Image: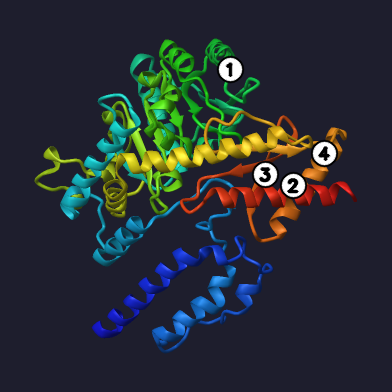
Amino acid sequence: MDKETFREFGYKFVDWVTDYLEDVEKFPVMARVKPGEIREKLPDEPPQEGEPMERLFEDFKGIILPGITHWQHPCWFAYFPANNSPPSILAELLTAGIGAQCMIWQTSPAAAELEEVVMEWLRSMLGLPEGMQGCIQDTASTSTLVALLSARERATNFESNEKGLKVPLTVYASEEAHSSVEKDVKIAGYGRENLRYIPTDENFAMIPSELDKAIAADKAKGMKPACVIATIGTTSSTAIDPLGPIGEICAKHGVWLHVDAAFAGTAAVLPEKRDMLKGAQYMDSFVFNPHKWMLTNFDCSAYFVKDPGALIRTFEIHPEYLKTGVDAKVKNFRDWGIQLGRRFRALKLWFVLRSYGVEGIQEFVRKQISMAQMFKKWVEAHENFELLAPVPFSLVCFRYNDGRGEEELNQINEKLLNEVNNTAEVFLTHTSLRGKYTLRMAIGQRTTQERHVKKAWDIIVESSERLSRE
């Protein structure tokens, strides 16, 4: 492709993205295609000769776009948000154009030093303890794996140094913890049989006394408790595990405390939400995702550690071909995680933080929380709907309940969700809380306004009324 063609389509693509951001509401939230439908429109073999960009662009619009589910739609209320923003998109364009591989300081000094700065900005914005240092991982799942590997190494080194013995290492998490915990425990070599799920209270938060009991029982069996994973904002209900009591237990037993705040961590930019971090001084590691609720394109996961040395000792490598003359003076982020090769993720985060400022991000988060409280009040006021969990952030867990038995209620709520989503006007997802089929209204999209939340509620109520007559 020559320079002029690149320039022509560069302008066209930017124009298209600009229009898309403005008009995304006109698309159905969910892709209206059947399994295999997109695949059938694509050739089985690659072209022998290059094709013009005009044809590629038309196929993108005609074949690919109909199969896209629109996460940036203002009526996206499923899962959690994966926000982007114009500043972040523009930064991604520059990142792609530069094409840097940022594994060590020497390969891109600006990338390494900018990452240091923006991570310190984030630490300060969230009110995390002084001295914690951070780096950018791809996802919270990877960050949790990094924490588990660090905890494993610390526990293993302790046992080797003190006794020269190998003992089974155990991990503890709330029964409401993210599914990636189990996956990461298996990848990290602990073994699924050494993962303990701790019971939760009426608010779906981990019960500290049950954690203490489980750790003591494993120690009595000759096992070595290595890591506790607490959650701020669980996936199903955004429950908040009590960090203070959990942290005291971890300190007593010498266990690594990792805190998963993938979605809800962004809320700590609000002074009125800082209570959720009481006990943060006990944390060994902490993760939240700017790519969920902080207007930054996927992927961008902010991972912080109390002791960077423990992290680096777990992952550092020193092959001759990666050694440089400045290694002792700089941070080589290849040693802060699993990946050797690293994208320049700090640039988009820098663009977002500078474009919105702390106050702009606070305003955005407060607005989302306010809309969730509005939706919560509608649920509470309606005779045939009920809340199923507290609403500390911007997720509302609820269900239709007209007095039927539990089995029937689960069935009708599943039908209700399908009815609502089949309109393609809004998109919600579900979970199960104490065996109850639960609808999740996850409010957090950058473009969502009160009218979109009201539209979702109207569709939900109308659909429930139709089902009740069947």
Q: Which residue is mark 2?
A: 461
> Which amino acid type corresponds to the residue marked 4 in the rendered image?
Leu
> Which callout, 1 or 3, points to the residue nearer the camera?
3
Q: Residue 97 location in percent, x, y?
A: 27, 67
| Crowd tier of the residue under label 3, counting other residues whose Cα lies within 10 Å: few below 14, some 14–19, many 20 or above | some
> Which amino acid type corresponds to the residue marked 2 in the rendered image?
Val
Image quadrant in which you'd find residue 395:
top right
The N terminus - image quarter:
bottom left
> Alpha-carbon distance for marks 4 and 2?
15 Å
Q: Which residue is mark 4?
A: 409
Left or right, residue 186 beside residue 136: right
Kindly identify the residue that appears in the image at 33 percent across and 39 percent down. 359
Q: Residue 188 location in percent, x, y?
A: 47, 37
> Which amino acid type corresponds to the residue marked 1 in the rendered image?
Ile
| Disc on the earlier residue, 2 or 1 | 1
Kindly identify the residue that appears in the image at 56 percent across and 77 percent down. 63
> Alpha-carbon distance for marks 1 and 3?
24 Å
Left or right, residue 429 beside residue 239: right
> Which callout, 2 or 1, points to the residue nearer the camera?
2
Kindly identify the residue that appears in the image at 32 percent across and 56 percent down. 87
Query: Callout 3: helix, strand or loop?
Result: strand
**Mark linked to residue 207:** 1
Q: Which residue is mark 3?
A: 430
| Crowd tier of the residue under label 1, counting other residues whose Cα lies within 10 Å: few below 14, some 14–19, many 20 or above | some
> Which callout, 1 or 4, points to the residue nearer the camera?
4
Q: Residue 274 location in percent, x, y?
A: 41, 25
| Disc on the earlier residue, 3 or 4 | 4
**Is there a contact, CB below 8 Å, between mark 3 and mark 4?**
no
- Residue 58 or residue 271, whichever sits in front: 271
> Which amino acid type corresponds to the residue marked 3 in the rendered image?
His
Query: Callout 4: helix, strand or loop?
Result: helix
> Which callout, 3 or 2, points to the residue nearer the camera?
2
